Amino acid sequence: MDFWDWFIVVTKVLAVFLLLPVAPLALVLFERWTLGRLQSRIGPNRVGWRGSLQTAADGLKLGIKEDTIPAMADKGIFWFAPVMMVTPALAAWAVVPFGPPVDVGRTFGLWVADLNVGVLFFLAMGSLGVYGVVMSGWASNSKYAHLGALRSSAQIISYELVLGLGVLAVIVYSGSLSLVDIVNAQAGLWFIVPQFIGFLLFLIAAVGETNRAPLDLPEAETELVAGFHVEYSGMRWAFFFMAEYANILLMSAIAATLFLGGWHGWTIPGLEAISGVGWFVLKTGLFVFAFFLFRAALPRFRYDQLMNFCWKILIPIGALNLLAAAALRMAWS
């Protein structure tokens, strides 16, 4: 690799891993505005123009707030658990394709890395997040945090199976584990058409994976105070919510990549790269809005309903859908 190859690689890495930590601040503000409109109430409107600096003020407040650690906590694991939540959510972005290849004298793709096992990398990073949940609940030396961590880990592991079944059906159609190849395979027909059931499974599982309403049992404050992060405060507490919104953005981007054709759409001649990035951002934004809409409109499940829905309904449907996808693939080939 020459200087320009290294420059392109470093630029893409910095663009992804410096901008993404800031994205949750914008998502929190957008969600609060959206919920205010949907629920006929006033959202943020005091700090900055129409409340545009509200999340910045909240971040400043958390930054100067006292950071307490329980006296009998395992301090090393207690400190590391929030980092374990955020890091996998950011690392998974390395395989997400933002747009088509660009030719500026040399051709490079608008993604950090095109791994031939990109889907497996995404699933692996997603599964690591449960360690942060378990570590925070165990290290806090609190019964409330411990119980919250146990049921949260059970929920995440269960819905990961549903997520995997939805992704496997897409792999059957595309014949590849590379996210770039999966996007290229949708140049003529987006996979949401033949795999609408897989799309619904992925969307429901993504809500469960990110602990969002109506499947937000890990943060059921009316039952477990605040779940696995009850003993956290200050910036360490903020890290958990940074991880939540980073995962919302990641799941939305992956859903757009797997089912809505990624960067494919109507393009302006000569501006294919800009049009592709625009389509990707638009599709991702639609999924992000869906997360906000679910929170505004749907009541929370009970825990027994949550697990019954996963194991007795979603997983059997996912297995049958995967079997049907494999049969149709064999019939067409």
Image: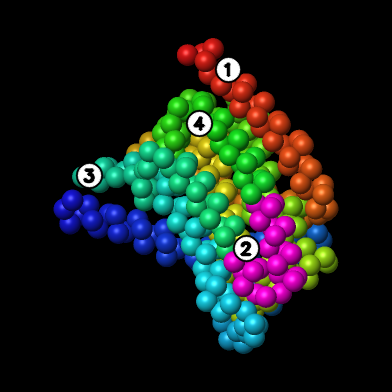
Give the mark toward the camera: 2 or 1: 2
Give the mark toward the camera: 2 or 3: 2
Please name the amino acid that badge 4 sits on.
Ile
| Label 3 sits on residue | 106
Gap between marks 1 and 3 measured at Cα: 42 Å
Looking at the image, tell me whether mark 2 or mark 3 is earlier in sequence order. Answer: 3
Give residue 171's mark: 4
Where residue 74 appears, as percent x and y from the top left, is 58, 77
Looking at the image, tell me whether mark 1 or mark 3 is earlier in sequence order. Answer: 3
Q: Is residue 286 visible?
A: no
Q: Residue at x 26, y 42 (%)?
A: 107
Give the mark toward the camera: 1 or 3: 1
Give residue 294's mark: none
Q: Which type of secondary structure does the marked residue at label 2 adopt? A: helix
Looking at the image, tell me whether mark 2 or mark 4 is earlier in sequence order. Answer: 2
Looking at the image, tell me whether mark 2 or mark 1 is earlier in sequence order. Answer: 2
Q: Which type of secondary structure does the marked residue at label 4 adopt? A: helix
Q: Is residue 261 visible?
A: yes
**Along the horizontal axis of the image, is 129 left or right of 182?**
right
Give the mark toward the camera: 2 or 4: 2
Gap between marks 2 and 1 measured at Cα: 39 Å
Gap between marks 2 and 4 measured at Cα: 31 Å
User: In this view of the protein, which residue sits in the foreground, 246 or 271?
Assistant: 246
Where residue 76 appears, as percent x and y from the top left, is 52, 76
Please name the amino acid that badge 3 sits on.
Arg
